[in-house]
Amino acid sequence: MSAFGKLVVIMVMAMLAISLDKAYAGDPDMLQDVCVADLNSSLTVNGYLCKKNFSEIDFSSMAIAKAGSTNTTFGSLVTGANVMKVPGLNTLGVSMARIDYAPGGINPPHTHPRATEMIFVLVGELDVGFITTSNVLVSKHIVKGEVFAFPRGLVHFQQNNGDVPAAVVAGFNSQLPGTQSIATTLFASSPTVPDSVLTKTFQIGTKEVEKIKSRLAPKK
């Protein structure tokens, strides 16, 4: 192969690598100016079908304007401003959320399979961190006005160890980042994960597994 031919091959491979990296970096690129989600459509696609008529209301929301109630199991509440609340976000590859924490509250270890997350502290202070695939904990105490990023797909958490409430605004590079809470995924799924899997994984007895399941079961 000539030197020019080798150069062409290298350039093609480089462009392919860039394209693949971009394809997996977040949501797919949009193909038109706007594609406001038709949340009432019965058809299922990767995202939502575009509705024919839209207005400024589809691009606006007060979903995260007020603090959420933190009277929950974990003392925290996540309020999303994603495509389900802001239909105009469909195909735009972005969304937000507000997270409120009571004193001692925690947003327990979880992952976002479709997005990287960055939080901005509105009030209070938090202890935050994520764990790499090499099992290394990257953690920091963050304060009002500070930002912290959690890489896509990695297990992460935030905890308010202070005596006053805390709150953050989170940004995501996905219109619907998805959330998998480690504890509830394993101990409160439906159907339930077999006790034998959990006892072997966590090296605990069946009684302990059943106790955890009962505590994390959805409240009726």
Image (cartoon, helix red, strand yellow):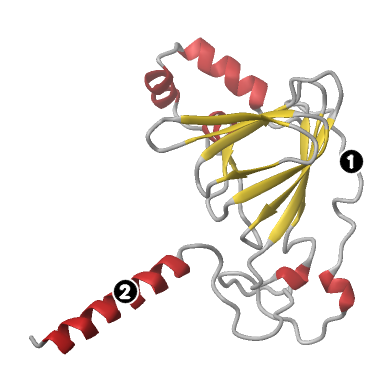
What is the x, y in percent for residue 70?
Answer: 83, 31
Which of the 4 image quarters holds residue 8?
bottom left
Q: Callout 2: 10 Å neighbours few (<14), some, many (20+)? A: few
Which of the 4 image quarters holds residue 160?
top right
Q: Which comes sooner in the sequence, label 1 or label 2?
A: 2
What is the x, y in percent for residue 218?
Answer: 70, 32
| Residue kind at label 1, given as amino acid type | Ala
Label 1 to label 2: alpha-carbon separation = 47 Å
Q: Is disc 1 placed on a helix, strand or loop?
A: loop
Q: Callout 1: 10 Å neighbours few (<14), some, many (20+)? A: some
User: What residue sits right under mark 1 in the picture?
Assistant: 67
Residue at 31% x, 74% y is: 14
What is the x, y in percent for residue 4?
Answer: 17, 88
| Residue kind at label 2, given as amino acid type | Ala
Name the residue nearer the viewer: 8 or 208. 8
User: What residue sits right under mark 2 in the picture?
Assistant: 14
Question: Which residue sits furthest left?
Answer: 1
Q: Is residue 108 visible?
A: no
Name the residue nearer the viewer: 47 or 152. 152
Q: Is residue 148 visible?
A: yes
Q: Quadrant of the N terminus?
A: bottom left
